[in-house]
Image: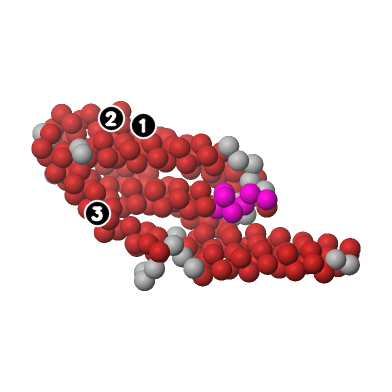
Amino acid sequence: MEATELLIQDHNRVKKLFIQLEAQSVTNANLAMAVQLFGQLAKELSLHAIVEEQNFYPALAAQPQFSALLKDSYHEHADMKMMIGELAQLDATSKEWKQMLTQLKQAVEHHVQDEEQKLFPQVREKLSISQLQMLGLQLEQAKVINLPGVYSSLPMQIEQLVLTEAAVQASDGLKTARMMGNAETGNQSVSLKAQAEDMIGNPAPHASGH
């Protein structure tokens, strides 16, 4: 697959994740799904940025015509990484989280527009099909190599979202249980935090050992 086609596929996956996230009104009831989607979004954006910065952009850097666009791209990546980090620190049910998610989406859309309408057409003109295919193979290999590192860096960010909200649910449940004298309700609420901790403590198989 040609490099530009592979990167466009990345863009399309990210677009779908934003649509799914924005379609939800994040509450304690659907928090786990929102955190899962955000984690997937963060993974896609992080991995995409890594392979572009380590492989795609350096392959173009020798050509002066790309210098301005590449400089902008590096800055845009830095801004997006900062916003992902800020989102990971916010309460996912808050108005601030929703606003920051919108800002991240707008930044990503601007970046995608610059690449697909300005950078990629010039790349296709400058590089041959065989060069694009070879670069595409390098990007695919770079994704495989960097994927474990991306996964290992995400749980710490996602963990705070999950455990913070699970703790809130547990605390609220205990208060209700005390008021109603319903110990069973309290036990169920406490289990929410235990389930969240278990989820964090048992990462997906692909992340093990990293």
Q: Position of residue 175 (x, y in %)?
A: 82, 65
SS state under label 3: helix
Residue placed most toward the observer, 41 or 90: 41
C-alpha span from label 2 to label 1: 8 Å
Q: Quadrant of residue 148?
A: bottom left
Q: Position of residue 121 (x, y in %)?
A: 23, 29
Tell me, yes or no, if residue 58 can be seen here: no
Of pointers 3 and 2, the one earlier in the residue sequence: 2
Position of residue 75 in the picture relative to residue 140 (left or right): right
Q: Quadrant of the N terminus?
A: top left
What's the mark number on residue 118? 2
Quote the CA–CA distance across marks 3 and 1: 24 Å
Label 2 residue SS: helix
Q: Are marks 2 and 1 in contact (CB under 8 Å)?
A: yes
Quadrant of the frame with the C terminus: bottom left
Is tag 2's residue or tag 1's residue first in the polypeptide sequence? 1
Q: Nearer the viewer, mark 3 or mark 2?
A: 3
The colour mode here is: secondary structure
Left or right placement of residue 141 versus residue 47 in this view: left
Residue at the spot of label 3? 142
- The residues colored magenta run 29-35
